[in-house]
């Protein structure tokens, strides 16, 4: 009997081990499936369902593998994608940082996955105007992709496109144009001129031409980007709203206020219907409408849109951000126009303080903020 028991034990041990391996593989496949489903929902802006899938994946992963596992790092990264799409940058930053910590633990610092996370986290810092944090991350991600994929790969072009945005933000317009054009050529060769990544680069390149006052070239590129996006997604899509909003900016700069307002209103409607009100893109459309209404002396309507947009910005990018400061300046301009000077002064001073804290006193935007405040005080002398 003793020998029989020993034989039974010998038989059971390998069977138990094999069962565990099989279960682990099955669990990993389940997590991968949930992450793929969540990505599909994120891409179609069905964020409620995306969050449910991610929450289930997180629970299964933490219970089965723990929160320091490689699998949990995949979940963290996808949560970062989710919060970025939702416009919640503080949470996106938190999840991307968690991903990097796990990837570093597994010595993945030269992997494409690590480069992906660097690129995504840098994108958050770029949106928060934290260029000093974003630029080195983009550069490291670009170097990894060049080493692993080569300089003709679309993933290399994607990071190059982001670095070009940094060049544009810092006023290096010629460098930005060259970087965007290089990315554009890579996409044209590898993906074709009808691809949405190609459209993104066109839209970004148009932004540079807009900044330097080449409105004709900007309009051509914005329109081409919109056409590609509309053919790919349909017009009721946030990417189309982005191009439409940019065209509104262009027409506003050209003095075509009624036309600009029409484009802004369409972009706002698309964003509300797709990503909802609590989104940076939605706030941006509201701010643009408020500025146009100010110029058209529709002050009550302008104030309403400004107040809504400020609350959205507080919940998404936060108050210590140049974009938030610019919105305060624009709202102050509106109060100046309607002779509500106490409110205008308060906002100009708040915007100046934000720029001093975030950008420093040597930054051109800080000088611009000082100029706004100086112009305000000068105007009071002549009242």
Image (tube, grey):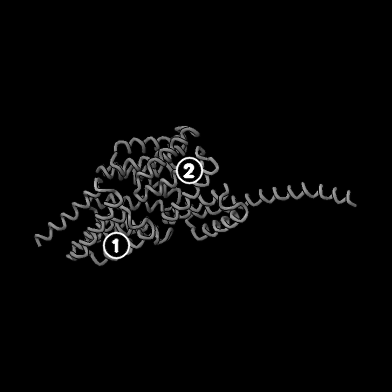
Q: How many marks?
A: 2
Q: Which mark is residue 291?
A: none
Q: Is residue 325 left or right of residue 281?
A: left
Q: Residue at x 37, y 40 (%)?
A: 163
Q: Bin the neighbour count of mark 1 within 10 Å (Cα to Cα): few under 14, some 14-19, many 20 and up.
A: many
Depth check, mark 1 against mark 2: the one in front is 2
Outermost residue toward the right? 1
Relative to 179, residue 129 above or below: below
Closer to the camera in the image, 34 or 199: 34
First in residue order: circle 1 vs circle 2: 2
Where in the figure is residue 342, as x and y percent of width and height? 19, 65
Q: Which residue is mark 1?
A: 306
Q: Is residue 382 left or right of residue 271?
A: left
Q: Residue at x 42, y 50 (%)?
A: 230
Q: Residue at x 26, y 56 (%)?
A: 351
Relative to 356, residue 147 above or below: above
Where in the figure is residue 38, as x and y percent of width and height? 53, 54
Where in the figure is residue 305, as x and y percent of width and height? 30, 63
Closer to the camera in the image, 344 or 45: 344
Q: Which residue is mark 2?
A: 116
Q: Residue at x 17, y 65 (%)?
A: 339
Tag 1 secondary structure: helix
Quadrant assignment, res 151: top left
Q: Bin the neighbour count of mark 2 within 10 Å (Cα to Cα): few under 14, some 14-19, many 20 and up.
A: many
Q: Are marks 1 and 2 in contact (CB under 8 Å)?
A: no
Outermost residue toward the left? 382
Specify whether residue 260 is in view: no
């Amino acid at each position: 009997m003793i020998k029989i028991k020993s034989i039974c034990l010998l038989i059971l041990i390998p069977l138990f081990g094999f069962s565990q391996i099989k279960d682990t593989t099955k669990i990993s496949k389940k997590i991968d499936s949930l992450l793929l489903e969540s990505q599909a929902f994120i891409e179609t802006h069905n964020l409620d369902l995306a969050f449910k899938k991610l929450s289930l994946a997180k629970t299964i992963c933490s219970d089965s593998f723990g929160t320091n596992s490689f699998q949990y790092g995949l979940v963290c990264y996808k949560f970062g994608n989710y919060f970025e799409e939702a416009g919640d940058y503080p949470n996106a930053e938190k999840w991307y940082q968690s991903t990097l910590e796990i990837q570093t633990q597994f010595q993945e610092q030269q992997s494409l996955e690590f480069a992906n996370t660097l690129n995504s986290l840098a994108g958050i810092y770029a949106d928060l105007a934290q260029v000093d944090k974003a630029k080195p991350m983009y550069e490291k991600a670009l170097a990894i992709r060049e080493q692993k994929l080569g300089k003709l790969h679309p993933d290399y072009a994607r990071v190059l496109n982001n670095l070009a945005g940094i060049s544009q933000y810092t006023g290096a317009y010629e460098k930005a144009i060259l970087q965007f054009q290089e990315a554009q050529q890579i996409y044209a060769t590898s993906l074709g001129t009808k691809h949405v990544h190609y459209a993104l680069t066109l839209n970004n390149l148009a932004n540079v031409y807009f900044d330097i006052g080449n409105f004709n070239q900007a309009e051509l590129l914005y329109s081409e980007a919109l056409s590609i996006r509309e053919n790919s997604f349909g017009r009721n899509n946030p990417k189309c709203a982005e191009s439409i909003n940019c065209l509104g900016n262009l027409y506003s700069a050209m003095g075509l206020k009624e036309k600009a307002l029409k484009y802004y209103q369409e972009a706002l409607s698309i964003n509300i219907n797709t990503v909802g009100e609590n989104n940076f893109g939605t706030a941006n459309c509201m701010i643009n409408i408020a500025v146009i209404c100010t110029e058209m002396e529709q002050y009550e309507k302008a104030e309403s849109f400004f107040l809504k947009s400020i609350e959205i910005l507080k919940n998404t990018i936060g108050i210590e951000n140049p974009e938030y400061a610019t919105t305060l300046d624009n709202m102050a301009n509106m109060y100046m126009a309607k002779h509500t000077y106490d409110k205008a002064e308060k906002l100009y001073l708040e915007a100046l303080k934000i720029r001093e804290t975030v950008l420093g006193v040597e930054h051109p935007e800080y000088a611009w903020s000082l100029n706004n405040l100086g112009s305000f005080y000068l105007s009071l002398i002549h009242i």
